[in-house]
Image (spheres, rainbow, N blue to C red):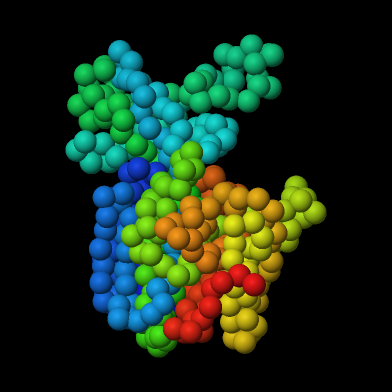
Amino acid sequence: MLKPNAVAFLKQLLDTPGPSGYEANAAKVWRDEARTFAAEVTADAHGNSMAVVNPGGAPTIMLAGHIDEIGVIVTYIDDDGYAYIAPIGGWDPQVLVAQRIRFLGRQGEVLGAVGKKPIHLMKPEDREKASKMTDLWVDIGASTRAQAEAVLSVGDAGVIDSRTLDFPNDRIVSRSIDDRIGAFVVLEALRRYAADPGEARVVAVATTQEEIGYLGGGARVAGERVDPAMAIVVDVTFATDHPGVEKKEIGEARLGSGPVLSRGSVLSPVAVRILRDTAESLRIPYALHAAGRQTSTDADGVHLARHGVATALLSVPNRYMHSPNEMVSLVDLDHAAALIAGACKAVTRTTDFTAR
């Protein structure tokens, strides 16, 4: 299982706000932890954070987990001091109704409550309609525009105000599991590899801007900079062990049953085989997922970097994605980190990543 200090770091990372384009605070927490064991820790202009172990080794393996989360951004403040918001990333507006928001204001964090017309004042035909983002506003307690603008500005970002919770059966709940969990797993895997390294130079990257209109984001930038021969991307996938999920459409992934390895589309059969062989040799449970087209993860950008990167995608089963209460199993995180560290050690200078 994960050590207590690793779990404490995980909770600190999850609770630090970091929506797409505003990841700096969460990235700093990640880099501070990386400095406790990595040989090199750096950042780039895009906001990516990188940690290197075995800097003189070869070939180079990149471990990528995006550190951004979905959030909101202030678009307008009216004369009464109410703030109006737009989404950063993919939101179901119903999730935002009656939530509290933590804005990253100019002088520090600003708390707000999402407002909506009370059901008593709605016309009968409107009560059954789904809320739109434009139906909502955020009340920060200001009485005037001037009061609001003293602490909040158009362009300030925010996240749902919630903290990580421990649940039974080694599960945790957080608003930012997608994909702060990925950033955690790649760093934990790097920590374990550092304790018993192989031949490869391994670079863990906390990438940026995956959640917004996907164009490759920080992952493609990092792929160009790191220039790896192989990459393992870590993200979340839909857990299927709750009501209302059609396994025939998305496969099967249960909390606590191990990480999910994707096959197909942009993914390297060589890199996937290394992960599968490692899982079987270490007796780490895993599931398989089929990706016939793009993966909608950082893998789509990384595999195209420079002259091409042999890329694998490892995912953590996640319940209630893009909500204030995403849920994962700590057992899955432990297995994911162990599998990645083992796969990195299995790669040698003679490993041929050419697909055959």
Residue 109, image x and y in percent? Answer: 27, 41
Q: Is residue 227 above or below residue 84?
A: below
Query: Which of the 4 image quarters holds residue 198?
Result: bottom left
Looking at the image, residue 127 sits to the left or right of residue 351; the answer is right
Residue 272 in view (yes/no): no
Q: Is residue 4 above or below residue 348?
A: above
Q: In percent of the image, x 33 and y 60: which residue is there?
A: 225
Residue 98, image x and y in percent? Answer: 50, 32
Q: In percent of the image, x 56 and y 63: which residue is there?
A: 313
Looking at the image, residue 74 sits to the left or right of residue 148; the answer is right
As drawn, which residue projects farthest toward the right? 248
Q: Is residue 213 above or below residue 61?
A: above
Q: In percent of the image, x 63 and y 25: which residue is there?
A: 130
Which image quarter is the C terminus in? bottom right
Number of residue marks: 0
Residue 353 in view (yes/no): yes
Looking at the image, residue 107 sits to the left or right of residue 12; the answer is left
Q: Which of 84/43 is in front? A: 43
Residue 351, image x and y in percent? Answer: 51, 81
Q: Is residue 161 above or below residue 274?
A: above
Q: In percent of the image, x 80 and y 54: which residue is there?
A: 248
Q: Which of 39/184 is in front? A: 39
Residue 215, image x and y in percent? Answer: 47, 43
